[in-house]
Image (cartoon, rainbow, N blue to C red):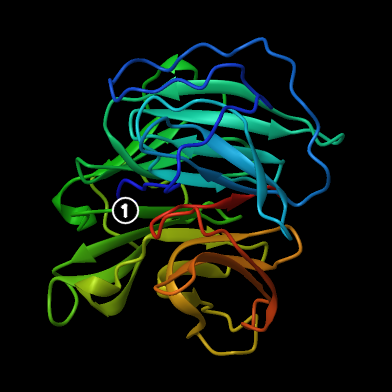
């Protein structure tokens, strides 16, 4: 996913997970974890986002109604992507490093680890075991183990001409281990075409995707992926788009919903879908939908930029 500015206003530092709110755009190894005492968050599920460009730090929304938020850490560079796994872990990347946060049963959010890799990350996903899958600017998908910390080396890499990877900026992994990559490719009609590349579980090396789902014009390339417990893929590409090959939701294999310009998408443990959409008149709004696209609620988050990635703990 391309670099994402997250807040139009400079925010003060409210310590929840980490004490410091640093800044600067220097590329350095993953910073150490602070020993600051975290503060409980009121009630789950929590929506996570990130800030820029003055200082870079992830935040958690403490109220959907009022769009209240608290800072939980510090990023080294501008935020690129956010994701979650099914064990209440939330992940952020600033392109250089991945920062992992845990939402405890009592509502405390705290950083547990961070690591840097061997390439510049463009998007991240995580499976139930804590493995992190990262797409990179070098047209690859790297997998890092659950104990990765500090300067780390991937345990597997998908790369090479046979993969058809060119400009991957979205990634997800389902419960069977399949890897979904949002890219633009030349193997679809009217190239370059937006596509979902699906690699088999355990894929590594110069391997072809098991499935290529052609989406059409390059402008329809997904900016963020989210996948639910039934392995239905949701992706932000103006609308909230759905790839449901087994028709779990009863709406067909591919459909879409949501107004505005959606650039962020997330899914919670109940299967509700969160879309971060911008509107010229009112700014950014986060909508909550059923998997079929029925709107449940919404809250205005006017200080979010139009390109903000979001995550929801599960």
User: Does 26 sit above or below residue 311?
Assistant: above
Q: Give the crowd class for mark 1: few <14, some 14-19, many >=20 residues within 10 Å.
A: many
Which residue ends up furthest to the bottom in the rendered image? 251
The quadrant in which residue 271 appears is: bottom right
Q: Is residue 172 left or right of residue 42?
A: left
At a point 19% along the width and 66% down the height, the residue shown is 185
Which residue ends up furthest to the right in the rendered image? 106
User: Does 261 sit above or below residue 190?
Assistant: above
Residue 313 lies, in percent from the top left, at 68, 47
The quadrant in which residue 267 appears is: bottom right
Residue 308 lies, in percent from the top left, at 44, 53
User: Does 182 sit above or below residue 42?
Assistant: below
Q: Is residue 224 left or right of residue 213?
A: right
Q: Which residue is mark 1?
A: 169
Local SS, label 1: loop
At a point 39% along the width and 19% down the height, the residue shown is 152
At a point 36% along the width and 37% down the height, the residue shown is 53
Residue 73 lies, in percent from the top left, at 56, 26
Which residue occupies the foreground of this view, 131 or 242? Answer: 242
Residue 295 lies, in percent from the top left, at 67, 80
Residue 46 shows up from this direction:
yes
Residue 124 shows up from this direction:
no
Which residue occupies the foreground of this view, 238 or 207? Answer: 238
Q: Is residue 149 left or right of residue 35?
A: left
At a point 38% along the width and 34% down the height, the residue shown is 94
Tally of marks:
1
């Amino acid at each position: 996913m391309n670099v994402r500015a997250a807040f139009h206003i400079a925010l003060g530092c409210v310590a929840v997970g980490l004490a410091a709110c640093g800044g600067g755009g220097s590329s350095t190894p993953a910073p150490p974890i602070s020993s600051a005492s975290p503060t409980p968050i009121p009630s789950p599920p929590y929506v996570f986002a990130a800030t820029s460009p003055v200082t870079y730090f992830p935040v958690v929304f403490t109220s959907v109604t009022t769009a209240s938020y608290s800072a939980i850490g510090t990023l080294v560079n501008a935020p690129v992507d956010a994701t979650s796994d099914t064990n209440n872990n939330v992940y952020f990347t600033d392109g250089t490093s991945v920062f992992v946060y845990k939402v405890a049963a009592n509502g405390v959010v705290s950083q547990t680890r961070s690591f840097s890799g061997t390439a510049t990350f463009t998007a991240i996903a995580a499976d139930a075991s804590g493995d992190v899958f990262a797409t990179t600017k070098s047209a690859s998908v790297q997998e890092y183990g659950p104990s990765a910390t500090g300067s780390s080396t991937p345990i597997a890499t998908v790369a090479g001409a046979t993969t058809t990877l060119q400009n991957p900026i979205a990634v997800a992994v389902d419960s069977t281990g399949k890897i979904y990559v949002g890219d633009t490719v030349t193997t679809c009609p009217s190239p370059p075409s937006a596509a979902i590349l699906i690699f088999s579980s355990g894929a590594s090396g110069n391997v072809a995707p098991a499935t290529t789902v052609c989406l059409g014009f390059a402008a329809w390339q997904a900016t963020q992926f989210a996948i639910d417990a039934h392995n239905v893929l949701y992706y932000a590409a103006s609308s909230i788009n759905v790839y449901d090959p087994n028709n779990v939701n009863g709406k067909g294999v591919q459909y879409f919903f949501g107004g505005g310009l959606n650039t962020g998408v997330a899914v919670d443990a109940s299967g509700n879908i969160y879309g971060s959409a911008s509107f010229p008149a009112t700014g950014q709004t986060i909508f909550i939908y059923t998997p079929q696209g029925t709107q449940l609620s919404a809250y205005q988050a006017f200080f979010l930029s139009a390109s903000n990635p979001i995550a929801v703990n599960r």
